[in-house]
Image (tube, rainbow, N blue to C red):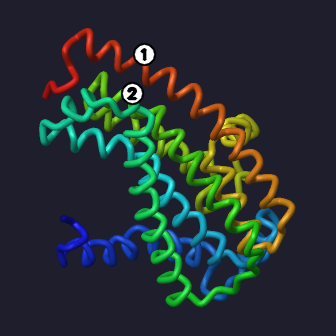
Amino acid sequence: MQWREGWFWQIGVLASLTLTVPVVLSARALAGPDEQQAARFAAVAGTENYLAFAAIGIVVFTWVLTTMQSVSIALAMERHFGTLGVAWASLTPRILLLAADATGRALAQSLFGLGSFATLLVLFRFELSVEPLALVLVLLTGSTASISVGVLLVGFVIRYRDAGMLAASLLMASATLAGIAYPTTVLPEWAQAVGHALPLTWIARGLRAAVVFGDAPEAYLASAVLLGMTLVLGAVGWQLFARLEHAARRHGLLEAF
C-alpha cells in the first residue's frame, strides 16, 4: 500500500536529505572555512576525506537503525491491525515469520540507504576508493547482524508491546559509541571497548575501509566479525524471544493494547 502512494516516495526523498545532510554539513563546519582542521581530522581518522567519512557514518546509522527496527515494526503493525494472533496461530515456524518480513524490510531500507548516499555524493562530490567484493561482503554481513539485533529487540515488543523507548535508547547510544561522525579513537578507552562490541561500529568500519580507504583486508576483517556477531546474537536473540513470547502468552498479552 505504501509503495503505491505518492507521499511515500516524497517522504523518502525528504528523509534522505533531512537525516543525512545536517551531519555532513557539521563535518564541513568543523573543518573550518578554509579546511584548516582537515589535517587534524586526518591525524586521527587516517584520511582527509572527512566528507565521505561522515557521509558513510550517517547513512550507515540510518540504514542499520531502520533494519534493526524492521522486525519490531512488523510485529507492532500486526498487533495494531489485530492480525498478530492469527499469524502466530499458523503452522509456519516463528523463525520464518520473523525472517521473511525482516528480510523484505531490510531490502527496502538498503535501497533507501543507497539513495541517501547517492544524494550526498551528488551534493558534496567527495572522492571514493571502492573495493567491490569487500563492499558486498560488508553489506551482506551488516544486514544479517542488524536483523539479529532486531530479533533481540522483538521479544520485548511481544512481551511489553512496542518497547520503543528501550530500542531508541540503545540505538542512539550505539551511534555515539560507534563513531558515526568522528573516529572512535577520540573516545575514552572504556567507550572504545564497549563500541567494539556493537555491530554498528564494525559496519561503519568495514564500509569506510571498502569505500574510503580502499583497504580490502580491513573490510574482510569487519565482515568476519559481523558474521560471528550474527551467529551469536541470532542464537541469543532467538532464545530470549522464545522466553518472552511464552511470558506474553501466559499473561494474555499477545493481542493486548
| 97 w.r.t. 235: above or below | below
Q: Position of residue 111 (x, y in %)?
A: 45, 71
Q: Position of residue 156 (x, y in %)?
A: 36, 27
Location of the C terminus by quadrant is top left
Q: Position of residue 146 (x, y in %)?
A: 54, 47
Instruction: Identify the residue at horizontal 21%, vertical 66% (top origin).
Output: 2
Residue nearer the viewer, 30 or 67: 67
Q: Position of residue 118 (x, y in %)?
A: 52, 82
Tags 1 and 2 touching, CB below 8 Å: yes
Residue nearer the viewer, 218 or 201: 218
Indicate the secondary structure of the residue bearing disc 1: helix
Q: Amino acid at mark 2?
A: Gly
Location of the N terminus by quadrant is bottom left
Pointer 1: what residue? 243
| 64 w.r.t. 19: above or below | above
Q: Residue furthest front?
A: 91
Q: Amino acid at mark 1?
A: Arg
Q: Gap between marks 1 and 2, in whole Å?
A: 8 Å
Instruction: Identify the residue at horizontal 68%, vertical 37% (top origin).
Output: 197
Instruction: Identify the residue at horizontal 70%, vertical 45% (top origin).
Output: 227
Q: Residue furthest top?
A: 250
Indicate the secondary structure of the residue bearing disc 2: helix
Pointer 2: what residue? 155
Q: Which mark is residue 96?
A: none
| 64 w.r.t. 252: above or below | below
Question: Neighbour class for label 1 at 10 Å: few (<14), some, many (≥20)?
Answer: few
Residue nearer the viewer, 39 or 167: 167
Instruction: Identify the residue at horizontal 60%, vertical 69% (top origin).
Output: 56
